[in-house]
């Protein structure tokens, strides 16, 4: 079983946030290499935002992400089972 580390959750969360951008909905896949493993998150998520006001300006921050459906694949020489948890990923989001 391939263990999903905190570094991999951070990388996945950063890439998912980039893919979401300023939207309130995302459906698609993000693929990337992490160390010697190919990773692919395929997901459909609804994004809830909150309004944030700072002296530097205002923006809509991600408040929550609700997965409608998701899969996380890890592949080395062959596809490997992994212990990915979307609930854990949410703790790393933006």
Image (cartoon, helix red, strand yellow):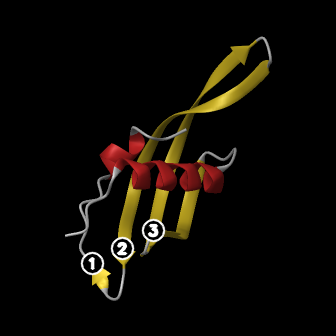
Tell me what residue is drawn at x 80 percent, y 17 percent.
56
Q: Where is residue 36, by image quadrant?
A: bottom left
Q: Position of residue 94 (x, y in %)?
A: 55, 38
For mark 1, does the 10 Å Cα neighbourhood hold few (<14), some (14 to 19), or many (20 or more) residues?
Answer: few
Q: CA distance from mark 2 to mark 1?
A: 6 Å
Disc 2 element: strand
- Identify which residue, 1 or 41, lies in the foreground: 1
Return the residue at label 1. Answer: 80
**Residue found 37% across the figure and 47% down from its top:** 6
Q: Write the residue at 55% across / 67% down.
A: 28
Q: How busy is the neighbourhood of tag 2: few (under 14 within 10 Å), some, or many (20 plus)?
A: many
Q: Residue furthest front?
A: 35
Element type where label 3 sits in the image: loop
**Residue corresponding to mark 2:** 74
Labels 2 and 3: the sequence-earlier one: 3
Quarter in which the N terminus is drawn: bottom left
In the image, residue 52 above or below residue 12: above
Q: Are marks 1 and 3 in contact (CB under 8 Å)?
A: no
Q: Is residue 15 above or below residue 60?
A: below
Quarter of the image holding residue 90?
top left
Crowding at mark 3 (Cα within 10 Å: few <14, some 14-19, many 20+): few
The residue indicated by pointer 3 is 35
């Amino acid at each position: 079983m391939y263990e999903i580390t905190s570094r991999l959750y951070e990388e996945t969360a950063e890439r998912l946030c980039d893919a979401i951008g300023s939207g309130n909905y995302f459906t698609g896949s993000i693929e990337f290499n992490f160390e010697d493993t190919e990773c692919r998150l395929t997901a459909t998520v609804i994004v809830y935002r909150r309004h944030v006001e700072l002296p530097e300006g205002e923006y809509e921050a991600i408040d929550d992400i609700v997965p409608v459906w998701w899969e996380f694949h890890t592949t080395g020489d062959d596809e490997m089972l992994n212990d990915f948890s979307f609930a854990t990923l949410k703790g790393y989001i933006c």
